[in-house]
Amino acid sequence: MKRKISFLFLLLFFYHSIQAQQIYKRVLKLMGSRFEIVVVADNQKQGDKYIDLAVNEIRRIEKVISSWDPKSETSTINRNAGIKPVKVSHELYNLINRANKISKITDGAFDISYASMDKIWHFDGSMKQMPSPEAIKKSVSKVGYQNIILDPENQTVFLKLKGMKIGFGAIGKGYAADKAKQLLVSEGVKAGIINASGDMNTWGKQPDGQKWQIGITNPLHKNTVFATFPLTDEAVVTSGNYEKYVIFNGKRYTHIIDPRTGYPASGIISATVFAPSAELADALATSIFVMGVEIGIDRINQLPGVECVIIDDKNKIHTSKGIHIQKYLTNKSKKQNP
């Protein structure tokens, strides 16, 4: 009898300990962007402690990858472009190495040396005509991941061309989200979301056992959601060009520039990528715009654990082979996309 009572007590204790956990979140500006950090914890004090850990980790990463901070490793690499290799931390070396691998996978559609690009396109309404072909070609003359030379033995990074630069604008927030999640998991946080201005990484489940529900914004109606996806241990990133674009000769050009040609991407208005890491999802979401619908989906279909949802400029939905979009559309979207 005592054993039964003790066992029942343990069950009740376990049940109440689960129910006691709640969701705690904080919204703040980090890396120049809006971050929302969500954790599941026993109480406010514990929740605040976990969130503080994530914030400090994100700030640490910013100091490593920032190209604005003259003291950062990234700035040191850029200052020595065309001069000499720079020895860097294991962390930054690996990040650059992974970035180069993504460049190869995407045939250069993703390229961290895009920071070398001359900014000749402006999407603030001031442009009245297209830049000349000569100006466009010149704008990308120092761009090319092939000129990022990595030496694994000495752990150095060398930019071959004088004036060449690297930047992590298309991958940095995703990387920060991954590292913050990794730290919190190591600290015993059972569930949460790191939302780095749309670059999201999730783990675990809500206190009631439900999966996290992630909504994808309708690119033509940014205050509405066209599809919701349940996630438990996955990253998702959406890139959109529905706000920053120009139209010349009836053609829409977006603010996402092809680093290989200097011309803005066209044909796609939204790309959402699901991947094991926000870093990878971040890079691929940008790359899809440059590669286009057909090549983009073909490339995603070759990557294990990666899926995508693309909306083209005709408002048509395209998906990779692992996503059956009808399951996730909102009721309103189902009527529009039977």
Image (cartoon, rainbow, N blue to C red):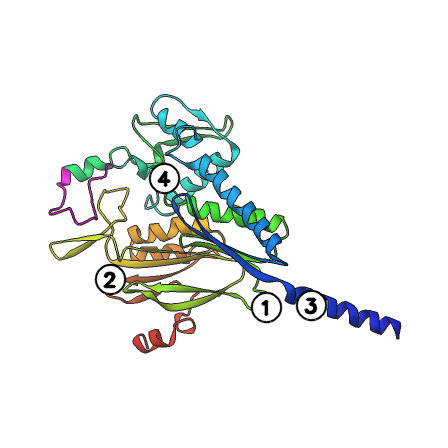
Residue found 34% across the figure and 27% down from its top:
160
Residue plotted at (11% across, 47% down): 128
Figure quadrant of the C terminus:
bottom left
Spatial separation of the CA atoms under disc 3 and disc 1: 13 Å
**Amino acid type for the residue under numbered disc 3:** His
Q: Nearer the viewer, mark 3 or mark 2?
A: 3
Q: How many marks?
A: 4
What amino acid type is highlighted by mark number 4?
Ile
Q: Is residue 57 left or right of residue 6?
A: left
User: Marks 2/4: CA distance?
Assistant: 26 Å
- First in residue order: circle 2 vs circle 1: 1
Name the front one of labels 2 and 1.
Answer: 1
Tell me which segment is drawn in magenta.
118-134
Q: Earlier in the sequence, mark 2 or mark 4?
A: 4
The prevailing secondary structure element of the residues shown in magenta is loop
Q: Which residue is mark 2?
A: 313
Q: Which residue is mark 3?
A: 16
Is 250 situated left or right of 208 in this image? left
Mark 1, residue position: 209
The answer for how far apart the CA atoms under marks 4 and 1 are is 39 Å
Closest to the camera, between mark 3 and mark 4, is 3
